[in-house]
Amino acid sequence: MLHAQRLPGARERQSVANALHAAEKTCDRRGVQLTPIRRAVLEALWQVDQPIGAYELIRKLETRLGRKLAPPTVYRVLDFLLEQKFIARIETRNAFIPCAHPDHEHTCVFFICEACGSSAEVENDKVEALFNIDAAALGFRIGKRVIEMQGMCANCLTASGAAT
C-alpha cells in the first residue's frame, strides 16, 4: 500500500501541534525525554516546508528563542531526533526533515522538488518488500533506510507549463 504525506508547512499549525503531541507520547512510551530544546528543534523542522541544513536551523532557532545556540548542542539534538526516527537526514543536501511516520520502521522515500525545495515522504509496502528480499539474497542487514528522488513537484510543473 502506498502512503504519501506532504509535510505540513507553517500555515498548518494544528498539524504541527499534532505531530509534536505524537512525539511527546512516543517519547513517554520509549522512556526518553523530549526536552524543551529537543521540542523546539522538532517544531522548527515541522514548520519548514522543505529540508533544512543545521546552520540554517540554528539561525531560525536563535531568532525564535532570542539566544545563541552552540552548534554541538543542536547536533546532539538532531542525533537524538534521528535515533528516535522523528527526523531523517537528506544525504544529498546535508539537511534534515521530519518523518511523517516515526511510529514504525520503514524506508523513508522522499520526493524533493529541485525548483521550490518542497518535499513529500512516501511509504510503499511493495518497495519495502523488494528491498528486504534483495537484502536477504545478499545476506545484507539494512540499517538506515532513506531514499531520495529529485525532480519537480506538480505545482512547479504546472507553474512552468511543463506538466504532462
Image (tube, grey):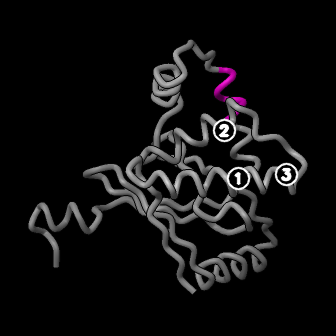
41 to 123, vertically: above or below: above
Give the Cα separation between the discs numbered 3 and 2. Answer: 13 Å
Q: Which residue type carries mark 1?
A: Ala
Q: Secondary structure at mark 3?
A: helix
Residue under label 2, please give it: 39
Residue 133 placement, left or right of 112: right
**Image quadrant of residue 126?**
bottom right
Please report whichever mark, 2 or 1, sits nearer to the chain's N-terminal start: 1
The residue at the far right in this view is: 31
Magenta residue span: 72-77
Residue at the location (85% across, 51% down)? 28
64 to 42, vertically: above or below: above
Horizontal and vertical percent for residue 72? 68, 21
Determine if the magenta segment contains residue 14: no
Q: Nearer the viewer, residue 67 or 115?
A: 67
Q: Secondary structure at mark 1?
A: helix
Q: Nearer the viewer, residue 15 or 157?
A: 15
Horizontal and vertical percent for residue 100? 58, 62
127 to 17, vertically: above or below: below
Q: Characterize the local packing of mark 2: few (<14), some (14-19) or many (20 or more) Cα atoms within 10 angstroms.
A: some
The residue at the far front in this view is: 14
Residue 10 placement, left or right of 55: left
* Numbered tag placed on residue 28 in the rendering: 3
Horizontal and vertical percent for residue 76? 72, 30
Residue at the location (64% across, 67% down)? 107
Q: Which residue type carries mark 2?
A: Arg
Residue under label 1, please give it: 23
Quadrant assignment for the C terminus:
bottom left
Q: Are marks 2 and 1 in contact (CB under 8 Å)?
A: yes
Q: Characterize the local packing of mark 1: few (<14), some (14-19) or many (20 or more) Cα atoms within 10 angstroms.
A: many
Determine if the magenta segment contains residue 76: yes
